[in-house]
Amino acid sequence: MKRIDNEKILDMIYDLADGAGMRIDEFMEQVEKQFGTEEAIPEGIPESIAEEIMQAREDKKRRRAEEKQIEADAEAENDVKKFRELFPGVSAEDIPDEVWEDAAKGISLPYAYALYKVMNEELAGYAESVNRKNSEKGARAYSDGSTEQAFTKEQVEKMSGKDVRKNYKGIINAMKSWRI
């Protein structure tokens, strides 16, 4: 029978975690909860040595957890430092909840905030262009009930004499709103 090396086992675990929609650490916690974390002690070992082995394993797990926490704290501190460098005028209260949610999912805070700003600017620019196009196309109702198109100064300057005669009333009404 062919042996499976550690790399293949690790790939399988990552695939299982991905299939379950979890990060690897969440998946491993779930596995530990479901199957327990006790590791077998070979038979025939005196009880005192078995206890020492179990204690050593627990100490090793605790040290690993502490190291992970120290790394996570250092990473969070670096994120905050980087954020302050990139966005010095932004306070924690100014950061929207969706950015905090992204940061809690593992995305770095500066990246999550930058992505939020870019997306909002894109949406604002798109909304502005749509509004501008719609306002150019739309008819404006005047007090006399007519719905003549409102013209901009640039549109009138580009009109031929025939177009000016045709749209004279609308041009006169539009001129009231021009800034000269």
Image (cartoon, grey):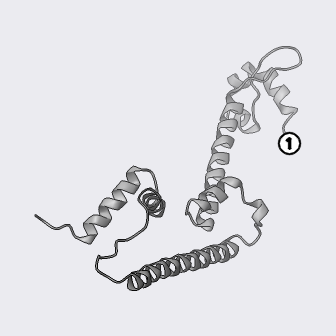
97 above or below 145?
A: below
Residue 18 picture quarter:
bottom left
Image coords of residue 152 (percent x, y): 75, 35
Query: Is residue 15 toward the left or the right of residue 37 in the image?
Result: left
Residue in the image at 35% along x and 84% along y: 46
Quadrant of the snapshot with the N terminus: bottom left
Q: How many marks?
A: 1
As helix, strand or loop, the secondary structure at mark 1 comes to loop
Quadrant of the snapshot with the C terminus: top right
Residue in the image at 88% along x and 15% along y: 144
Is 173 or 11 nearer to us in this picture? 11
Most distant residue in the top direction: 145
Residue in the image at 73% along x and 33% along y: 156
Image coords of residue 10 (percent x, y): 32, 66
59 above or below 132?
A: below
Residue in the image at 41% along x and 68% along y: 38
- Identify the residue position indicated by label 1 in the image: 179
Q: Amino acid at mark 1?
A: Arg
147 above or below 38?
A: above
